[in-house]
Amino acid sequence: MPGDASQDEFESRVKPLWLRAQAGDEAAYRESLSRIAQRLRGYLRRRLQGMPHDVEDLVQETLLALHLQRGTYDPAVPLGAWVLAIARHKLVDLWRRHGRREALHDAWDDVDESSLVELVACDETAQARRDLGKLLDELPAAQREAILLTKVEGLSVTEASQRTGVSESAIKVQVHRGLKRLATWVKQT
Amino acid sequence: MRTDAWIELLARGAGPAPSGFVARRVGAACVLGVLLSLALARALHGPLPADLFSAAAPWMKLAYTGLFALAAAWLVARTARPVSRTKAPARAIAAVVLAMAGFAAVATWLFTPSGERMRAIMGQTWMLCPWTVLALSLPTLALLIWSVRGLAPTRLRLAGFANGLLAGAIAAAAYSLACPERSAAFVAVWYTSGIVLTGGLGAALGGRALRW
């Protein structure tokens, strides 16, 4: 069945990357997020047929959620199921914000073969409507600076700490808080 | 922002995934919850006289509620993650409840004269007990809701129910240090009722309160 092959392929290709990413391999993290984004796009495109302009926004919102909740991934669980559960949670949130009542009757944690057929790789990236870059600029100064230095300019935490005079652990805390705040704002737009 | 730029931003300097992520948040809520429950129980009833601890009753209650809390904490940790695997912790909770029920049944039918059995089950405070457990559990429940909301539960009512069971078990353990009742039957019926009642409250609140 195409669904099984697709699901198995995703697990066999992306899960090893993800596990390396969990251990700290940045290149593996980047690669696995890319592949996960492709899958999310295909899945959400089908579910958001009435709202095509929201697909890329939701892809980005889900990627942020995956990042912030990396610590909840349990290697005993298939990566696809974990990603899908978070994506569905965000999807229901979006529907609720748009007034549509929760229509997903299927059990959240059933790794249903037919739904995984929808995890078809999708390379075409529609333009996101929401500009996360703009939202980043609106963060409080400490959080914005920590994120810009370490994640945009690419400084190490040590370098950023020397540049700003703030301790290394404080830099990490500010980055985390900034991303969490972004996640909250994104829910409101 | 384009998604590939967004991915670049997320990945850069990300480091390893945090370890003990769930355990730390839930654990912190539990420790604080225990302290608050103990303080509340003592405020409500005053400290238990020390000589009461030479009897079996407080130890029996602490053992039951302590084991219940451990199994419930396991369930909380599982339901705080997406794709929660709940079979094993659910079975553990059932095992604790059934073991207590079995113990109480044996104690009542074999060691309590038939005329006194009803009194053993009802005790003197059966009306108060479940509601006191519920009241004592409220601070812990609030703490657990706050901590689990920062994680990623995807079955919200089940996660809420687990939170309630844990808060209730902790509250019941604190209550057992102030409660005058002695019979295992009383504990099996009324302490369990209080814990399940709190579980129900957690479930009712969870659907809304645990959204993240």
Image (tube, helix red, strand yellow):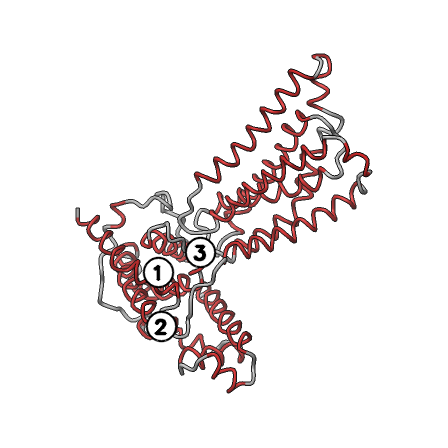
The reply, left or right, for residue B117 in relation to residue A10 is right
Which residue occupies the foreground of this view, B103 or B25?
Answer: B103
Which label is found at residue A19?
Answer: 1
Which residue occupies the foreground of this view, A87 or A19?
Answer: A19
Disc 3 residue type (three-letter): Thr
User: Gap between marks 1 and 3, in whole Å?
Assistant: 13 Å
- Please identify the residue farthest to the top as the structure is shown: B114
Q: Nearer the viewer, mark 1 or mark 3?
A: 1
Disc 2 residue type (three-letter): Trp
The reply, left or right, for residue B97 in relation to residue A74 is right
Taking B173 as reference, is A11 above or below it?
A: below
Q: Residue at x 65, y 46 (%)?
A: B138
User: Gap between marks 1 and 2, in whole Å?
Assistant: 21 Å
Q: Quarter of the image for the N terminus of chain B: give it.
A: bottom left
Q: Residue at x 17, y 46 (%)?
A: A1
Chain bearing tag 3 is: A
- Please identify the residue farthest to the bottom as the structure is shown: A163
Q: Are marks 1 and 2 in contact (CB under 8 Å)?
A: no
Chain bearing tag 2 is: B
Give residue A127's position: percent from left, percent from top.
Answer: 29, 71
Q: Which residue is mark 2?
A: B6
**Label 2 element class:** helix
Q: Which residue is mark 3?
A: A72
